[in-house]
Each structure stands twice: as C-alpha cells, then as structure tokens.
Image (tube, rainbow, N blue to C red):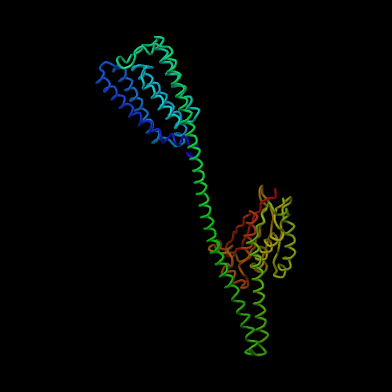
Amino acid sequence: MEEQFPLQAELIERIDWLISLRWLAVVGTLLTIVVVNSYFPGLLLQGPLIATTAAIALYNLFFFLYARWLRTHQSTALRLRQSTVFACVQIALDLITLTMLLHFSGGVENPFALFFVFHMIIASILLSPTVSFLVALLASSLFAAMALLEYRGIVSHYNLVGLINPDLYRHGTYVLASILVMTTTLFLVVYMTSSISARLRARTNELLEVSQSREAKSRELAELNTKLQKLDAARTKFMVTVTHELRAPVTTVYSCLDLVLGGYASREKERQILERAQHRTTELLDLVKDLLELTGARQAEVRAEEAEAIQLADVLRNVEELMRVEAENKDLFLSVDIAPGLPLVKAEPDHIKAIWTNLISNAIKYTEPGGIVVASLTHNPDYVVGMVRDTGIGIAAEDLARIFEEFYRTANAKATCPQGTGVGLAIVKRMIENYDGKIWVESELGRGSKFTFMLPKAR
C-alpha cells in the first residue's frame, strides 16, 4: 500500500516531526517574548502574544493525540488517505497563528515575517507541488491582508517603538513593496523546493524500483535454482530406477546365453533356457518402449492452444477395436459409452491414443475373466470427461497416493501380473497435464477401479 502512495507514506513519517518542530516553536516564541521584554520593556504586547502561543500549544497537543490515535487504532490505508489533509490543516493553522503573532508584534515592520519561508519549505517537502503553491497563496494572502488592514486602519497596528520606524506601516509604497517581495519570495521558495523535492523523489522511486527489480530477480533465481535442484534430484532418481529396472532382465538374458554357449545346459534344457531369455527380452523391449514414451511425455511441450482440435470419441473407437480382441480372449465384457454432441479438444491424436490404450489395457490386465471394463466419454461446461472403470483387483487405500509414480506397482498388481514396468500411469498423467487437464482414481481393494480424466474444451 505504501509503495503505491510514496508521498503519503512519507507524510505519515513526517507528521510527528512536524508536531515536534511546533513544540520547539512554542518554546522559542515564549523565550523570545521574555528576552525582548527584558531588554525592551513594554515593546511587545505580552498578553495577546502569550495567548496566541498558548493556542498554538493547545492545537499542537490535539494534533499529537490525534496522530497517536491514528497510529494505534487505524489502518495504514486510512492514514495514507488522511495524511495530506492532516498536514494541510496543521500548516494552515500555523500560517494563521504566525500572522497573528506578526500582527501583535509590529505587523509588516517585523523582520520575523520571513518565518513564512520556513513553512513554504516544509510544505514543498511534504506536499505535492499543487498543494504547496496553494499554501504559498494562503500565506501571501494572509500577509497582504494583515498589511493592508493595518494600512487602512481597519485593525490596530502595534508599533515596535524604539526598534523600527513606527510609521513604516503607513507608507503605501513600503507596504506594497513588502507584499510584493513576500509573495515573490514565497512562490519562488515553493517552486525551487518543490522542484528539488520532485527530482529527489523521482530519483528515490527509481532506486526503489531498481532495488525491487533486483529483489524480484533474486527471488526468481532462487526459485529457479530450487527447481533445478529438484529436477537434478528427480533425474538422478530416474536414472537409478531405470538402471535397476534394466539390470534384472539384461542379467537374466546374459545368464541364459552364458549357460547355453558355455555348454552348461543339457540339450533338453537349452530350449527352456532360450525361451526364458526370449521372455525376458520381451520384457526388456516393453520397458524400453515405455521409457521412450515416458521420455516423450517428459519432453512434450505442446500445449492445448498449439495442438489441433480433435474428437476424443474417434480416438476411443479406434482404441476399442484394438483392445476388443484382447478383452474377448480373456472373456471380458468391454463396453464403450459415448455421450452425443461431444465438443472438440485440442491435443495430439497420438497422445490421446496412448492415454486410452494405457488405461483400457491396464483395466483388462487386472480384471479377472468374466469381468467388465467400461470406457465412457461425457462433458461439462468446461471439460470433456473420460472414464475407464473395471471390476478388477482394485487398489489398496495406502497405494492410491503413489499409483501415478514412475515404476511404482502395487503388491497386488505384481501378484496378479508379474510382467509390467509401472510406467503406463505416469505417462498418462504427464500427457494429460501437458494439456492442462487432470486425472484421478477411485478404487477399493477387490472391488475394481475407476480412472477419470478431464481435458479442457477447445475454444
């Protein structure tokens, strides 16, 4: 909030300073009255001057209490809004009471009329240039009104007898010259001080913006460094996992070939050993295929707005044809339910095919013969919703949070189907998220699973 209103924020800090200066002015005025009357008895009217000084002390006490109340009970936003008005009221009262002090101590003849200049400097530092010029206009008007009223005899004039020529206030030329000089001086002071203050503020704001920009860049660099560290840790974990997954089938194949080539296996067992090697090689090829798909999903930067608009139903029907034979061979009922009037989705067809294939293939793999697998497509106001439901083995509650992790397979899945890489669902999740979609699973052990994903409609 304070960065949006730097001038008001500065005022909040300077209001206490202004009040403190006024206390010094009260003490200084009283001391001046005492000293002058000690050396020049009867020169000053003590009663009106002390009463005016007391009035200054009284309203300054009010300002002090009001400022403390604002700091304690009001928000920074309220203080920002009231700061300019608060400062203007203080300066206006100071100018009025200063005019009264001058009036009771010689009027236009009093050299302390130059004290008006101090208020112009203060106003120019604390207030905007427009308000500062208005303050200069008020001060000039008050001084001119005092001088002209005394000159015309409308109000009494109190001479500084024995100190200054008592008839100066009656000389029209002197009075006009004093008004002209005072007005010119006040406006020049405001102009010069406001210009300097404006430049200083502009420079301060520039430095503040540079500092904020550097802080923002430092935070960005820190965030990027954190992300890089996480990516590096993820890459290391990925490489270790891949190495572990590749080592087992490669070791098995090597051992089988070594047995056959080394003549350690009998003729009867050679075929069995080679079939085992072939089986492990098939697993290895499946793993390599999944790793390539996962790498492609990791590197895919195609967003929905850059892809072509496609119909998910068409892709689902094609995948259904491919999966139906596999489902029938396992004596499963495969059903596809597509709602009418489905909107298009911006995505790569191959990615959508991989999503449907992985989800339906998993459902078939982990559903016992005689079970049901259902794939469906519906939509809501913002998304096209895909769902694959089965009556298979289900997922334990403790495994649901990790089901989309790379290379993660539940104990139940391993027992049902030892062959598998645990990469398919990770691929699905990454591809869906590439298109600003989301996927989740609902499942209960022994009672089947339901995978649901949503992709934004093409706009």
Image point 34% across, 13% down: which residue?
Answer: 166
Tell me: residue 373, above or below residue 122: below
Towards the viewer: 258 or 193: 193
Tell me: residue 210, above or below residue 328: above
Residue 304, horizontal then vertical, whole percent: 67, 53
Q: Tally the numbered discs.
A: 0
Residue 65, horizontal then vertical, whole percent: 36, 30
In the picture as drawn, the residue positioned furthest to the top comes out as: 153
Towards the viewer: 311 or 386: 311
Q: Is residue 427 left or right of residue 166?
A: right
Q: Is residue 249 left or right of residue 25?
A: right
Q: Is residue 28 left or right of residue 403?
A: left
Residue 124, horizontal then vertical, whole percent: 45, 30
Towards the viewer: 331 or 199: 199
Towards the viewer: 383 or 458: 458
Tell me: residue 372, above or below residue 35: below
Residue 383, horizontal then vertical, whole percent: 66, 51
* Quadrant assignment, res 140: top left
